[in-house]
Amino acid sequence: MRLTISILTLAIGLASCSGSNKVTTAKEGGKSIERKKMACGKVHVDMNEPHLDWFEENNSILSKADEILVLPKDYKVYTIESAQLNNFFSAIQNGKTLSTVIPLPEPADCQIFTVKNNLKEGSRIPAGTTMGAGESNGQKMAISYYMGKLAANINWFDLQYEVTTVLIKGTPYILVYEKQLPPPGKTKSTNQEVTKPEFIEIQYNK
């Protein structure tokens, strides 16, 4: 199955969060995977509570995708252990309020968001979906988890950030980038041409 993901390019370059050089090992599908850097390693939350640890991945991991990916020019790729995701969103779904780090591009950088369930009574959503609302420094985030995929939209002082998930060989990889609205079309009054958003298509021949 071929999946095309269209994401508008960023206006501001994506920079990595402060992290550690600690080498960690996690198990995914019974296999040990070594990850070289944990994003936002210097930003701490209560480690005894469910939370999300973001591991930076090399963008070259996308070369293993069977799909054609249309991606922004600037983005970051992360992974989060499945057990952490399940524990975090199970607690959210059960009404617990939790704090976790989100690795945003500059100028926001790594931020701690307080997340709680915001599903209204009577709302109709696909079974197994967890919807959450996040807040950090008065800024808002909508976050969801469904069938192993994490998604989020963050408003950060008039900047829009987006989190989305792609599957590569059955493993979820999380993309974080700044979202930019498309430019308006050519207007009749000025007949002025506008620059189209720039994006790249990555196609790998198997």
Image (tube, rainbow, N blue to C red):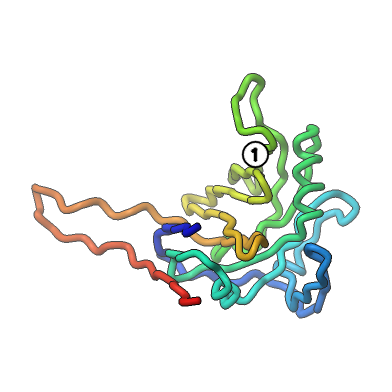
Q: Is residue 103 visible?
A: no
Q: Which residue is mark 1?
A: 133
The spot of residue 24 in percent (x, y) is: 82, 74
The spot of residue 56 in percent (x, y) is: 67, 71
Residue at the far top in the pictured view: 122
Amino acid type for the residue under numbered disc 1: Ala
- Please tell me which residue lies in front, 63 or 40: 63
Query: What crowding class fits label 1: few (fewer than 14 Cα within 10 Å), some (14-19), or many (20 or more)?
Result: many
- Please tell me which residue lies in front, 16 or 169: 169
Vertical order, 143 against 201 (above or below): above
The spot of residue 39 in percent (x, y) is: 70, 68
Vertical order, 17 against 84 (above or below): below
Residue 128 found in image quarter: top right
Q: Is residue 25 visible?
A: yes
Mark 1 secondary-structure assignment = strand
Please indicate whether residue 47 sits to the left or right of residue 104 in the image. Answer: right
